[in-house]
Amino acid sequence: MLLIQGALALALTPVGACAQVAATLSAQTDARYRGQSVSDGRPAFDLAISYDAPVGLYGGASVSGSPQPDTGLRLIGLEQDFGYARQLDSGFVIDFGFADHQHWRYQAGDRYGYLDVETYAGFRRGGLSAYLFYSPHYDVSGARALYAQVDLQRPLWGPWRVFAHAGLLTPLSAEAGPYYPTGEHPDGSVGVSRSFRRVKALLAWSAAPRRPYSPAYGPAGQAVILSVAWGF
């Protein structure tokens, strides 16, 4: 579930899970990346394969598609990440790795591409995590940027969990291009999730200020997102 960033992805991952190879098929009413839609506000589908481990090496990849008005289901995203996690005596897990995000939008028969290559480092403990991402090639301009995020999930009752996410994108390049997101850009989300054996459902409210037009992004602003994921 790489398209659902931060706490939304965290809410669909069991806390304290053992190392395992897993596949997840999911559907969501809107696929968002750091607060902005990568599916133009349309439903999206995602197939992800991952090797998850509380400590040690981990990695994953996903492919995403979304129905387009004139051409039917089209590819909108390819993402992969890998890293290494180590648990400290204090109980904190430190984590660092690499990620690659590629997204495409379709408008009037044209396809617009987006690329974000980044390294990251952070820590997690229980349902709390904090990460800092550095990208030497962000958005369509290829400029440098930092992204910081904090995520939290807590048990609510029974199989229900509550989660929250806060993020901040900070451009680092002075030579901002016409589509580059100048100025700092926050985003956030809150929601609840529930497990049904192999199926997990999630309902979230996502918010981010609208940016200047970019061919790589769809709507920002506020959105209520429903996601259902099936693990197998």
Image: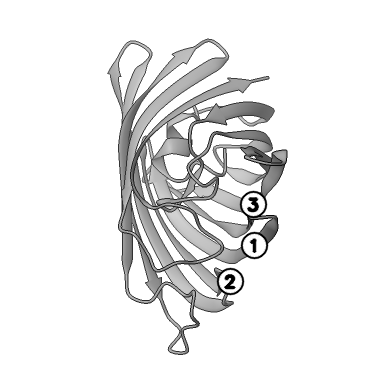
Q: Toward which corner of the image does residue 224 lie, by quadrant?
A: top left
Residue at screen point 48% across, 38% down: 30
Category of crowding for the residue at label 3, using alpha-carbon neighbours closer than 10 angstroms: few (below 14), some (14–19), many (at least 20)? some
Name the residue located 50 percent from the left edge and 82 percent from the top edge.
Answer: 177
Which residue is denoted by mark 3 in the rendering? 81
x%, y% of residue 66? 63, 38
Judge by depth and name the residue closer to the eye, 2 or 226: 226
Q: Position of residue 14 (x, y in %)?
A: 48, 26
Looking at the rendered structure, the kind of residue marked 3 is Asp
Image x and y of residue 89, in percent: 41, 46
- Disc 2 marks a residue whose amino acid type is Val
Tell which of 24 and 152 is nearer to you: 24
Which residue is at a point 33% across and 65% down the rendered structure image?
185
Q: Nearer the viewer, mark 1 or mark 3?
A: 1
Q: Residues within 10 Å of mark 2 (few under 14, many from 20)?
A: some
Front disc: 2 or 1? 1
> Tag 1's secondary structure?
strand
Residue name at image x 63 percent, y 64 percent: 115
Name the foreground residue: 159 vs 17.
159
Quadrant of res 126: top left
- Residue 15 seen in render: no
**Between discs 2 and 1, the one toward the N terminus:** 1
Q: Which residue in the protein does label 1 denote?
A: 112
- Between marks 1 and 3, how big is the CA–CA gap? 23 Å
Question: Badge 1: few (under 14), some or many (20 or more) residues near its Cα, within 10 Å?
Answer: some
Image label count: 3
Pointer 2 residue:
140
